Image: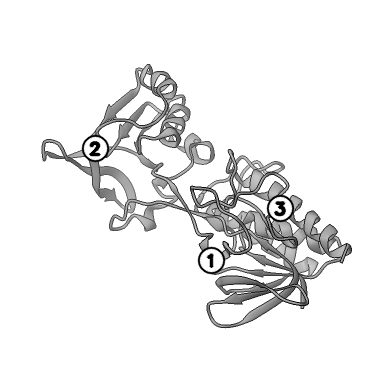
Amino acid sequence: MHDIVIIGGGPAGMTAALYALRNGKSAVILEKNGFGGQITFSPKVENYPGFLQMSGNEFADLFMDQIMKQGADIELEKAVSVEKTAEGFSVLTESGTGFDGKAVIIATGVKHRMLGLPGEYELVGEGISFCAVCDGDFYTGKTVCVAGGGNSALQEAILLAGKCEKVIMLQDMPVFTGEKKLQDVLFARDNVEKHVNVKITGLRTENGELTGVEALDTASGERFTVACDGLFEAIGLIPENDAFLPQADLNKWGYFDSGEDCLTKTPGVFVAGDCRSKAVRQVTTACADGAVAALAACRYIDQL
C-alpha cells in the first residue's frame, strides 16, 4: 500500500507527488496517456517562473526526472473508480489492477474540445493552439483565426488582437454568445473580423504547417477558405470526472465542486488542477493545486 495514490500525471499530479515525497510519504501516479498533460502540446513554455523558455515536452521530462529521483512510483494505467476500504482506498484501473492508498488525489485534468477534422491532432502545437496566454506571442504580427463565440473565445481573441495583425472570429452559431462587454471590447478593434454561421470543415497546410481553414457558411451554403497562420480553438473543455462521482461532487459543468482547499465530501480524497471548479486554468495554478492537495493529504494521513 502507498500512502497516496495520485490519479493523473499532469503538472498538478506531478506536483502532488513531489510534495508528498518531500513530506516523507510514498506516492504512486497513475497516468492513462502520457506524463505532462496538456502542456506537452505547447512548443514553447515562456510563462513558468524561473525558466525563460522551454518546450512543453522538456517541462514534462524535467518534472518526471525530478519526481522519480525523489522516489515516485509511476504506472501507465487508466483509473476507473475509487472505493473506500477498511485500510483506506482502492483505485481500480481499466486493466483490473488495484492500487491501495491511505489517501487519493484526483488530478485528471481536462481535454480540449476539438473540431474533429482530418489532420487536426497532428497540427496541435504546429499551427493549432488552445491558449493565447501560452502561445499568442508566436503569432505576433500574423493572422490568426479563433474558433468559437463564447466568453473563452472572446477573451482569447482580445489577447490575440493586441499582438496579431489580424484576428478572424469564426462562430458556428447565428450569434456570439459571450458577454456583451467582451464583445464591445473585442469588436471595437480595427484588426478584428467577425463571422457567424461559419463552420470550419477542413484545414489547409503546406510543408506540414497550417496555412488556412476551409469553411462553410451554414446560412447561405457558400464554401470558402480563410488564409491564416494559426488557429486558436476555444470551443470548450471536457472534464472526465464522472467515474469518481461517488467520492466527490461535480458542478453542473462536470468539474469537481471543490474550492482552493482541494477538499471533497470524502475525507481522504482530494482533487487538484484543471479538473476542479476554478476561474484560472494555467500550468502555475495546476502546480499550486497539486501542492495544496498533497499537503492536505499528508495532514490527513498524519492524523489517522
Q: Which mark is residue 226?
A: 2
> Label 3 amino acid?
Leu
The x, y position of residue 287, in whole percent, is: 68, 50
The x, y position of residue 155, in whole percent, is: 46, 31
Eyeballing the image, is 6 above or below 274? below
Occupied quadrant, residue 5 = bottom right
Query: Along the horizontal axis of the image, is 241 left or right of 198?
Result: right
Q: How many marks?
A: 3
Identify the residue position indicated by label 3 in the image.
263
How many residues crowd around disc 2 within 10 Å: few (fewer than 14), some, or many (20 or more)?
A: some
Q: Which mark is residue 111?
A: none
Q: Residue furthest left?
A: 221
Identify the residue position indicated by label 1 in the image.
243
CB-based contact (under 8 Å), mark 3 and mark 1: no
Query: Along the horizontal axis of the image, is 291 left or right of 197?
Result: right
Query: Along the horizontal axis of the image, is 9 left or right of 170?
Result: right
Query: Who comes first in sequence, dot 3 or dot 1?
Result: 1
Question: Which residue: 65% across, 48% down?
Answer: 258
The x, y position of residue 251, in whole percent, is: 54, 48
How many residues crowd around disc 1 within 10 Å: few (fewer than 14), some, or many (20 or more)?
A: few
Residue 13 showing in the rendered view: yes
